[in-house]
Amino acid sequence: MGGFPIERIRAITFPPPPSIADVAGRADVGLVRMNFNESARAPSPKAMEAASLALLDANRYPDHESRVLAAAIHDKTGVPVDRMSFGNGSGEVLVAAAMVSIEPGDEAVMPAPTFPTCGKGVQIAGGRIVNVPLKPDGSNDIPAMLAAVTERTRLFYLCTPNNPTGGVIAADDLRTAFNKVPDTCMLVVDEAYFEFASVEGGPDVLSLLKERAGPWIVTRSFSKAYCMAGLRVGYALASDNDIAYGLWQLRPNFNLGRPALAAAAAAMRDEAYLQETLRLTIAGRQRLSEALASLGFEAFPSFANFLTVRAPLPASKLGRELEKKKILVQPLPWPDERGSLRITVDSRESTNRLVEALADLIEP
């Protein structure tokens, strides 16, 4: 007898999330959190009002079919509601996407580094991850990933814009992937940051997917552009209703609460607030990039609400020193031993505090 947990679960490799350092349920106001890719803005006032009203019925279970939210997503994407599924953040649907695709011994081709949650699902299902290094600009290397496909490949995961680097996949590369990934392989496209890429001229993934004959799943989130990371709402759009039903089969009952569902539906219908959030975030990203460039940092192209930069000093050392000053950023062991820093676009005050601290560390 091998004991519990079973060996496959015991062997899962998945980085734990950093400590969020909340105090009595509220974020520590003395801490600058530029490591989570959260929004510096509160959700839309309409979303907040909808969530507050939903609390009046908190004694009742929520609508597991998520009908109001599904209708809002349909209005925006054109995808039929029977080709959708919902999760407690897009991470939950990414795990489900792997589990509907992978049998023990199957392979999943993934960029590296990337958002790890779909890979966690592959491990839960007993599959093997085949990591393919990113292109120098931080985007997924489609030719190299296609070259890694074998007869055992059952999942092909793309992340655009890629987390943690911010690079977006070009339309021609997406088209190549959509046409060449075998029909026996589930194509998963993680678009947690797609609103940012879309407003900056990025490819329309859903339109390009119309050229694909094989199965696909697109995942999206309300945590980033909709400023709702704490409410945990994500969704999947699938190529057909059989795949969507498979995702539903894996959903825990009532996995989205009433306030989260109400807020997400209201936020999606508040287009003006979304566009203002995107404008402010992109402007803040540019301001952060220029300030860091003045200190000798080199930024990778980013189409998200964060910036990944090469530092004049080892990234891990800078991360530790900033933490001592109560400023959190995310050091990355990429693209080489010197590493890089992923820094969330935050308020002007947080940016100023970060830049001042880095100036002290780099130019003592």
Image: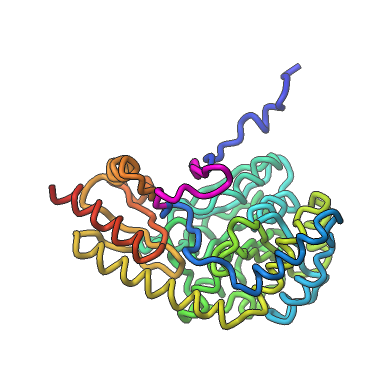
Residue reaching furthest top? 1
Residue shown at the point (39%, 64%) measured from the top left: 347
Q: Is residue 202 left or right of residue 309?
A: right
Q: Is residue 359 left or right of residue 83?
A: left
Say how many tags the image has.
0
Residue shown at the point (31%, 63%) measured from the top left: 299
Residue 148: image location, x then y, percent? 53, 54
Residue 328: image location, x then y, percent? 39, 48
Residue shown at the point (61%, 73%) measured from the top left: 45
Residue reaching furthest left? 364
Is residue 150 visible to the viewer in this orientation of the structure?
yes
Is residue 143 visible to the viewer in this orientation of the structure?
no
Q: Is residue 22 magenta?
A: yes
Residue 357 versus residue 193: which sits nearer the camera?
357
Q: Quadrant of residue 230?
A: bottom right
Above or below, 206 against 96 in this view is: below
SS assignment for the magenta stretch, majority: loop
- Residues in magenta, as a range: 19-32
Residue 171: image location, x then y, percent? 51, 77
Residue shown at the point (43%, 71%) measured from the top left: 281
Quadrant including the N terminus: top right
Q: Is residue 79 magenta?
A: no
Residue 206: image location, x then y, percent? 64, 76
Residue 107 versus residue 161: which sits nearer the camera?
161
Q: How does the figure colour the protein chain or chains?
A: rainbow
Q: Quadrant of residue 324?
A: top left
Q: Quadrant of residue 8?
A: top right
Q: Is residue 94 left or right of residue 22?
A: right
